[in-house]
Image: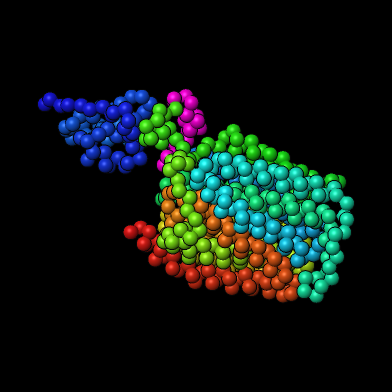
Amino acid sequence: MKRGVRSLLPGERADLGKPAERVAGEVKKKAEGEIGKEAIKVPEESSEGEIKGELKSSQLLEKDVKKPSLLPLLSVNFIGTLGFSIVLPFLVFLVERLGGNAFVYGLISSMYPACQLVGGPLLGRWSDIYGRKKVLLLSQLGTLFSWIIFLAALFLPAFVLLQVDSDLVGSFVFTLPLAVLFFARALDGLTGGNVSVANAYLADITPEKERNRSFGRMAISTNLGFIIGPALAGLLSVTEYGEALPVFGAVLISLLGVYLIVVYLPESKECAFGLAERGKTPLPEGQNVRKIFGYQLRECRNSSEVEALGFKELLKLPFLSYMFGLYFLIFFGFNLFYTAFPLHAIARLDWSIVDMGLYFTVLSSLLVFVQGPGLLRASKRYSEANLVIFGCFLLGTNFLLLIPGNLFLIYLAAGFFAVGDGLMWPSFLSLLSKFAGKDSQGTVQGFASSFGGLASISGLILGGFFYGQLGANTFLIASFIIYFVFLLSFRLLRFEKDLRI
């Protein structure tokens, strides 16, 4: 039988993302796939055997497009966490040595999220318009300079700026080094788009069905930083250089993060296929940086195609206002814990920096296990909404176990924390990214970080204040908040069902 053939025209783009099962039904209409400059010719009429041949060819072409690599992004995330976690274990001791108390520790911890309220949404919108890589680089540079300022503060004279003696906030001395530490944390917060933009970047390159596990891998990279960081802090802080050596380590680690972004992290907002769609000439094969890294994108957009949404427009999108509310409550409960627990460990358990570092290392190690093989198995059996619900229940229980101050119960609580947070948080972020849609990931993640920042300010300040007034009963408040989130999360089951429809 005589058969005609047709080649792809110069302006056409092959779609390699369609499942192989659909190729047989479309093989008479157009070719599926295009590699380099070669056009694929397809018969207009095909026998059953020829259709199978086309199916096989299509499957081979799909294999040629490599799966997006998360390694550069995970490395940058790990580096960022490692720098902060080196300083975290001794920060409360440093604040007290420089004249502060529990209230001042809460204030200085809240500077980062307070300034992130301003910087987060702005950086998120910029990443939607100008690209993720540029904004991640700006954020990492801000972190680098903030640690340099933090290091300089350790060598300043303890000049007294303010002395306070109050029944409400306690007694403390506000010194010049403390003021500089406040400024350093504020700068890091103002440029602190690392997490929100990284989440948007991940959503750019990950299919929805794999997003839960990808956020789990992101959380693993974070917790690996929290495993190694406190251990390094314990080793470095006992040297003759005191706190200066761990902070200097944070400076070097942040510098490494800048290098990784500049050299190894591809941009996730443009690609050669996108240029072809707009009638421009794609980059030559050898000049396409995504080919060099074996990196392909699901969607191709440029800054002229993106309209950044404002806060009011975002709230009109389905489910987002409810998700922002849950985001706030989760962060508020967590930050009551993050502020109160170091104070509890010092006052009730008489822990040292080494003890604190060991606890956070064990906690982070458990999180890595849960967010790796644990989440992988759970996500195959249960929906993301169910994992959020179950995780919140375990987290609320974890905070109750901290109240007695028993060492066994504290480490048992670490297990509850690891399973609860390891299942809940990646699943929650995955749901949020799906509700955000494809064009507003950065903006949504930026505003979500602002809600988290507002909750962090409240939690960090009130955590120190509550512990000064209530002691270990502060964990009861944190538990109540997370149990409340547990109840509210049942509504996510309906949201998830509507999303599938």
Question: Based on the displayed image, in which of its 4 quarters is residue 47 positioned?
Answer: top left
Q: Looking at this view, is 392 or 262 the one in front?
A: 262
Q: Residue at x 27, y 42 (%)?
A: 21
Q: Looking at this view, is 322 or 28 the one in front?
A: 322
Q: Is residue 226 visible?
A: no
Residue 401 horizontal/vertical position (percent): 64, 70
Q: Residue at x 44, y 25 (%)?
A: 284
Residue 87 horizontal/vertical position (percent): 73, 51
Is 289 included in the stretch rendered in magenta? yes
Q: Residue at x 51, y 52 (%)?
A: 443
206 lies left or right of 192: left
Is 474 included in the stretch rendered in magenta? no
Q: Looking at this view, is 73 or 458 the one in front?
A: 458
Up-down: is 250 above or below 374?
Answer: above
Residue 26 horizontal/vertical position (percent): 23, 38
Up-down: is 220 above or below 411?
Answer: above
Label total for image: 0
Q: Looking at this view, is 309 or 292 the one in front?
A: 309
Q: Which residues are magenta?
A: 284-300
